[in-house]
């Protein structure tokens, strides 16, 4: 994985990378979970032909469209789930991209045209949404009268941000702020999280990240709940916006780490009882329990690569959290 800062805000279709059929379709299917939608059994069956390479995404989209044309009175939301899954797969199957508000709106239009009346348009009313992870409370979303201005401001700030000389930890922390803020604006009445997810995937690729694992496919509901927690404050109850969950998600997505992503840990009541340790805290705790612990053992315990563990330990040494005594071979760790 490398970061190509020089080509940060636009990609040409000629640069398109070949993504596996399974990756693009399973991501499209998985992202339906952000709105608790389920794909039809018919769709899952016919999509096997695409996964095997027997038909194209265009063929699959045509088959799905014909299926629902024959069922105009379909009451379940499987039509939305099936059609959007294919459209997401088509959007993330290539890297053409521009870092603009127009691109963000365009993704929403492509995804929801024919399904939502306001596809590609910002909402014209204010909203509140009862969230399970907040015990029924709602995030405070952007005022509909300021959506365009707020989007332009956030995009402008991100476009001018300099990633050079930042560590990977700092890059991911910054990306978490940008993504959380973009989602909280909630530019669209419906389909906001799925649109944001697709935009984020394409943006991260434009930064040079190889976003081809199954993090979104398997953890879409966690992603949405992490965005909720990253944007919620209730000072009276001692609850503050918490981006640690979103950062864990991004570290799995971008660095192929194996941080545990459990929705129950996102619930505000759960957080009062158990506060998950950060990766650095876990490393320090392991060293405190066993000063002679090997880096390989730390990596295996955390579920990360040896290189990632070495990098984290180096940072802890530099910031004065730990110190190595008696050399590399026979030494031990001292927690400061």
Image (cartoon, rainbow, N blue to C red):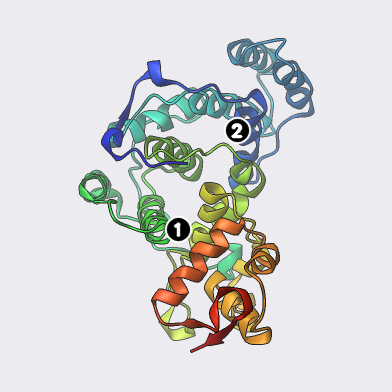
Give the x, y percent position of residue 35. Answer: 59, 45
- Are there few (<14), some (14-19), or many (20+) residues within 10 Å of tag 2? many
Residue at image location 55% in from the left, 53% down from the top: 223
Give the x, y percent position of residue 88. Answer: 54, 29
Element carrying mark 2? helix
Residue at image location 59% in from the left, 44% down from the top: 216
Q: Is residue 145 found left or right of 260 in the rendered image?
A: left
Q: Disc 1 designates what residue?
A: 128
Query: Is 231 located above or below residue 210 in the figure?
Result: below
Quarter-of-image position of residue 285: bottom right
- Are there few (<14), some (14-19), or many (20+) residues within 10 Å of tag 1? few
Query: Is 9 located above or below residue 215 in the figure?
Result: above
Q: Is residue 130 visible?
A: no
Residue at image location 75% in from the left, 15% down from the top: 49
- Numbered label attached to residue 82: none
Q: Disc 2 designates what residue?
A: 28
Q: Is residue 302 found left or right of 100 in the rendered image?
A: right
Give the x, y percent position of residue 70. Answer: 70, 13
Query: Is 170 located above or below residue 213 in the figure?
Result: below
Spatial CA distance of label 2 from label 1 is 26 Å
All told, the count of numbered labels is: 2
Q: Is residue 307 visible?
A: yes
Quarter-of-image position of residue 265: bottom right
Residue at image location 49% in from the left, 60% down from the top: 247
Element carrying mark 1? loop
């Amino acid at each position: 994985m490398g970061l190509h800062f020089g080509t940060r805000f636009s990609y040409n279709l000629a640069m398109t990378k070949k993504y596996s059929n399974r990756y693009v379709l399973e991501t499209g299917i998985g992202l339906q979970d952000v709105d608790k939608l389920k794909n039809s059994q018919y769709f899952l069956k016919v999509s096997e032909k695409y996964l095997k390479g027997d038909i194209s995404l265009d063929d699959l989209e045509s088959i799905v469209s014909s299926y629902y044309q024959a069922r105009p009175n379909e009451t379940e939301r499987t039509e939305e789930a099936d059609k959007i899954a294919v459209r997401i797969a088509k959007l993330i199957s290539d890297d053409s991209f521009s870092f603009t508000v127009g691109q963000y709106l365009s993704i929403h239009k492509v995804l929801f045209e024919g399904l939502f009346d306001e596809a590609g348009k910002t909402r014209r009313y204010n909203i509140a949404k009862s969230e399970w992870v907040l015990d029924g409370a709602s995030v405070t979303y952007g005022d509909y009268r300021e959506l365009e201005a707020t989007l332009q401001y956030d995009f402008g700030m991100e476009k001018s941000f300099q990633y050079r000389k930042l560590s990977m930890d700092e890059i991911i922390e910054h990306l978490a702020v940008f993504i959380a803020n973009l989602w909280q604006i909630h530019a669209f009445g419906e389909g906001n999280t799925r649109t944001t997810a697709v935009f984020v995937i394409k943006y991260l690729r434009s930064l040079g990240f190889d976003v081809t694992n199954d993090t979104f496919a398997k953890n879409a509901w966690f992603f949405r709940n992490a965005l909720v927690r990253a944007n919620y404050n209730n000072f009276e109850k001692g609850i503050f916006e918490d981006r640690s969950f979103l950062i864990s998600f991004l570290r799995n997505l971008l660095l192929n780490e194996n941080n545990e992503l459990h929705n129950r840990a996102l619930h505000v009541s759960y957080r009062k009882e158990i506060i998950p340790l950060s990766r650095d805290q876990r490393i320090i705790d392991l060293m405190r329990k066993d000063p002679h612990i090997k880096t390989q053992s730390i990596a295996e315990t955390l579920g990360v690569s040896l290189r990632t563990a070495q990098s984290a330990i180096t940072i802890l040494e530099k910031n004065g959290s730990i110190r190595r005594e008696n050399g590399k071979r026979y030494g031990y760790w001292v927690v400061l």
